[in-house]
């Protein structure tokens, strides 16, 4: 649309020390996201920044902040969370990996001797699945049955005591879901 230029967008950006590009125009009162009139409708500034730099946002995808600063529109601090919608759907349906996705089929070696190896290594992706499953309402016992970990380990993961970085990222994704519906 005429007038929706990169220059007009850039004029509302305040580059602050530390690398964030803070939105200096309208900020949404409750969500804290920058807002801009763009392509005929009010949109979140960080999403527009993504579109300017990367093209259209695929349907159902979220533009996530790596920097925890919702006013920030620095494209280097933004990433596409195309799995988040799926995760949210899973949360709503209280679903977590079972059936073919169950670890005993994906990783049969975990079932060897009918025992769990206390030292079994979880993958980063498993940690996220555990966090989302717990959020979806799965109990610690249910999760411990689905993954090669003991209940105590699950409890430490869902409380953020272990895998702290992943836990922080998970919390960030949750926060973004809360306010990123346009
Ligand atoms: Zn930033």
Image (cartoon, rainbow, N blue to C red):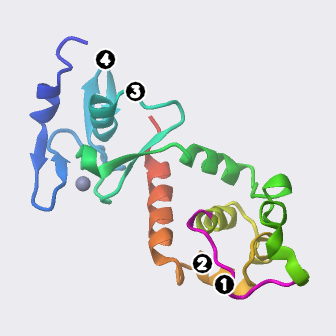
x then y, percent, for residue 20: 19, 54
Q: Camera-side residue: 104 or 69?
A: 104
Distance from disc 3 to disc 4, alpha carbons, whole Å, reads 16 Å
Q: Which residue is mark 3?
A: 56
Label 1 environment density (alpha carbons within 10 Å; few <14, some 14–19, many ≥20): some
Q: Are marks 1 and 2 in contact (CB under 8 Å)?
A: yes
The residue that appears at 40% across and 27% down in the rendered structure is 56
x then y, percent, for residue 95: 76, 54
Q: Are marks 4 and 1 in contact (CB under 8 Å)?
A: no
Mark 2 vs mark 4: which is more N-terminal?
4
The residue that appears at 69% across and 63% down in the rendered structure is 133
Of labels 3 and 4, the one closer to you: 3
Q: Which residue is mark 4?
A: 40
**Does 120 appear above or below 175?**
below
Left or right: residue 43 compared with residue 24: right
Q: State the extent of the magenta-drawn residues as a range.
A: 115-125
Q: Which residue is mark 2?
A: 157
Label 2 environment density (alpha carbons within 10 Å; few <14, some 14–19, many ≥20): many
Label 4 environment density (alpha carbons within 10 Å; few <14, some 14–19, many ≥20): few
Q: Which residue is mark 1?
A: 153
Mark 1 vs mark 3: which is more N-terminal?
3
Mark 4 vs mark 1: which is more N-terminal?
4
Task: Give the farthest residue toward the top.
Answer: 2
Left or right: residue 20 compared with residue 162: left
**Does 76 appear above or below 18?**
above
Location of the N terminus (image quadrant): top left
Q: Camera-side residue: 31 or 155?
A: 155
């Amino acid at each position: 649309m005429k007038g929706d230029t990169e220059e007009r967008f850039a004029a509302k950006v305040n580059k602050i020390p530390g690398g964030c590009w803070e939105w200096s125009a309208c900020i949404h009162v409750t969500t804290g996201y920058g807002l801009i009139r763009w392509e005929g409708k009010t949109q979140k500034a960080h999403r527009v920044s993504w579109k300017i730099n990367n093209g259209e946002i695929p349907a159902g995808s979220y533009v996530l902040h790596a920097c925890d600063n919702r006013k920030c529109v620095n494209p280097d601090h933004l990433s596409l969370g195309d799995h988040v919608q799926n995760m949210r759907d899973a949360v709503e349906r209280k679903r977590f990996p079972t059936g073919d996705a169950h670890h005993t089929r994906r990783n049969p070696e975990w079932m060897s001797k009918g025992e769990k190896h206390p030292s079994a290594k979880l993958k980063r992706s498993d940690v996220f699945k555990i966090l989302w499953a717990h959020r979806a309402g799965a109990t610690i016992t249910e999760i411990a049955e689905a993954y090669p970990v003991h209940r105590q380990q699950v409890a430490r993961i869902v409380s953020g005591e272990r895998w702290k970085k992943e836990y922080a990222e998970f919390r960030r994704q949750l926060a973004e879901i809360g306010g990123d519906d346009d």
